[in-house]
Amino acid sequence: MQRRKSQIQPANLKKKAIGFVVSEFRREAGFSQERLSADRGFERTYLSRVERGILNPTAIRLWTIANALNAPFHAMVNRMESWVAEQEKARHQR
Amino acid sequence: MQRRKSQIQPANLKKKAIGFVVSEFRREAGFSQERLSADRGFERTYLSRVERGILNPTAIRLWTIANALNAPFHAMVNRMESWVAEQEKARHQR
């Protein structure tokens, strides 16, 4: 019997998805890392680490970033899930 | 000029939204706090504090909880945003 656990993507892939999508949404909204960080009152290095998939932000911080980029949080999350699905599909095709 | 900042919901309301919706999704999926915690390898008291809006989980932890409840993460987030919108509407009507 296959356990449900095995269908859950590893945390590392999720972290990369978060970084990729935050960076993508930020650039689409025309914000620099400097401007977004200053607007929200956090360090640019913090944002840089989130975008590189090094740092795991809290849900509220991510939600606030989406708001600052005038994007619904669920749209950002939807894109993260698609990104993970694309990565997994590519992996299975290799 | 109204600043964009003022349109962003306070962190406390977001934290309550997260707690409310995690609890709602868990109960809809027919999971007890004990079962969900044990499945995902975290403490029941951790989950209890998230559900009471006391603790601010990481985005990955929340995503993993959604997966464990067989729900897309974006569906959970969508519900959180609706909950915040409902709360704000109710506040303006008072």
Image (spheres, coloured by chain):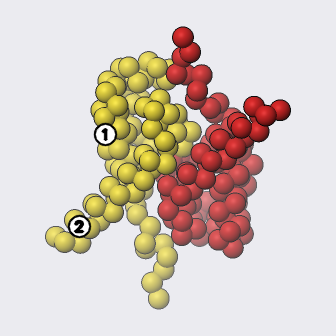
Chain colours: A red, B yellow
Query: Please, is residue A3 above or below residue A25 in the view?
Result: above
Q: Residue B60, image x and y in percent?
A: 56, 39
Quarter occupied by the N terminus of chain A: top right
Q: Nearer the viewer, mark 2 or mark 1?
A: 1
| Residue B11, picture quadrant | bottom left
Q: Nearer the viewer, residue A4 or B11?
A: A4
Query: Which residue ends up furthest to the left in the rendered image?
Result: B94
Check contact, mark 2 vs mark 1: CB within 8 A: no
Query: Please, is residue B42 above or below residue A75 in the view?
Result: above
Q: Residue A17, image x and y in percent?
A: 67, 46
Q: Residue A52, image x and y in percent?
A: 75, 49
Q: Residue A51, image x and y in percent?
A: 71, 52
Name which of mark 2 and mark 1 comes first in the sequence: 1
Q: For the point 34% across and 49% down, which residue is it?
A: B16
Quarter occupied by the C terminus of chain A: top right
Regarding residue A14, the answer to whether it shows in the image is: yes
Q: For the point 43% across and 72% down, which residue is it?
A: B7
Q: For the point 19% across and 72% down, which residue is it?
A: B93
For mark 2, what is the residue?
B91
Subunit under mark 2: B
Label placed on residue A57: none
| Residue B83, picture quadrant | bottom left
Query: Please, is residue A82 above or below residue A44 in the view?
Result: above
C-alpha separation, residue under disc 2 versus residue under disc 1: 22 Å
Regarding residue A47, the answer to whether it shows in the image is: no
Subunit under mark 1: B
For mark 1, what is the residue?
B24
Q: For the point 31% across and 35% down, which residue is it?
A: B28
* Labels 2 and 1 positioned on one and the same chain: yes
Q: Is residue B94 left or right of residue A71?
A: left
| Amino acid under disc 1 | Glu
Local secondary structure at mark 2: helix
